[in-house]
Image (tube, rainbow, N blue to C red):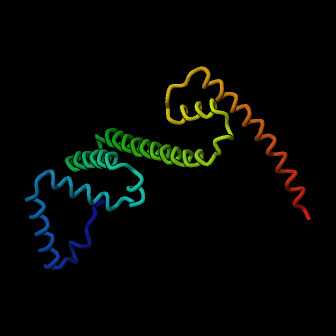
């Protein structure tokens, strides 16, 4: 099936002149300037909220990956023999995109948990348990003692959550009029 552009049939002389001027200006640009323009265009298409959440380096790497794929695709005249390569490119780009989302979500969750952890009163936990939690949260190597206190806290939490179910039932009973 042949695709025919409607603009070809309905174009004005003014738009053709503007298009030619743009093409001439684009041809006179250096390779770096062309890449920058392509990146800017792609970032305009991406949701600005997503751009704010993702680090600049990740975006540039991702855009470079897409641009190299686009350039490779533009240089192909017959894609039927390259279907497997195209599928591989797309799968790799999709995996990288999801991997970046997961990293960003983990950072957001850690930030939220850190803010919530600061709300816990200092005297709620004993000192050794608090130290063990801080080590776990910051990724510092833990000792056997730290692991012991974390396991102990986990057991206490499980017990308290079981009790919380019962307290909720009792609260609901008391709130009945």
In the image, taking residue 176 as reference, residue 142 lies left or right, namely: left
Is residue 82 shown above or below 29? above
> Image point 86% across, 56% down: which residue?
172
Whole-percent x, y for residue 149 in the image? 65, 27
| In front of the other: 4 or 153 | 153
| In front of the other: 34 or 18 | 34
In the image, taking residue 119 as reference, residue 38 lies left or right, namely: left
Q: Quadrant of the N terminus?
A: bottom left
Is residue 159 shown above or below 148? below
The residue at the far top in this view is: 144
Whole-percent x, y for residue 47 in the image? 40, 60
Whole-percent x, y for residue 104 in the image? 45, 46
| In front of the other: 106 or 139 | 139
Whole-percent x, y for residue 10 in the image? 22, 78
> Image point 54% across, 45% down: which residue?
114
| In front of the other: 133 or 61 | 133
| Picture quadrant where residue 40 is located | bottom left
């Amino acid at each position: 099936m042949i695709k025919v552009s409607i603009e070809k049939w309905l174009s004005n002389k003014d738009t053709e002149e503007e298009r030619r001027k743009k093409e001439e200006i684009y041809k006179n640009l250096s390779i770096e300037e062309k890449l920058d323009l392509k990146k800017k265009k792609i970032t305009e298409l991406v949701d600005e909220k997503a751009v704010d959440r993702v680090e600049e380096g990740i975006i540039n790497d991702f855009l470079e990956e897409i641009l190299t794929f686009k350039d490779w695709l533009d240089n192909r005249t017959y894609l039927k023999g390259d279907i497997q390569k195209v599928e591989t490119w797309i799968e790799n780009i999709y995996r990288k995109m999801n991997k970046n989302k997961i990293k960003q979500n983990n950072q957001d969750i850690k930030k939220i948990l850190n803010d919530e952890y600061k709300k816990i009163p200092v005297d709620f936990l004993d000192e050794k348990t608090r130290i063990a939690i801080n080590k776990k949260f910051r990724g510092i190597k833990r000792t056997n003692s730290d692991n012991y206190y974390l396991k102990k806290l986990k057991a206490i939490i499980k017990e308290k959550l079981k009790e919380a179910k019962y307290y909720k039932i009792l609260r609901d009973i008391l709130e009945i009029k």
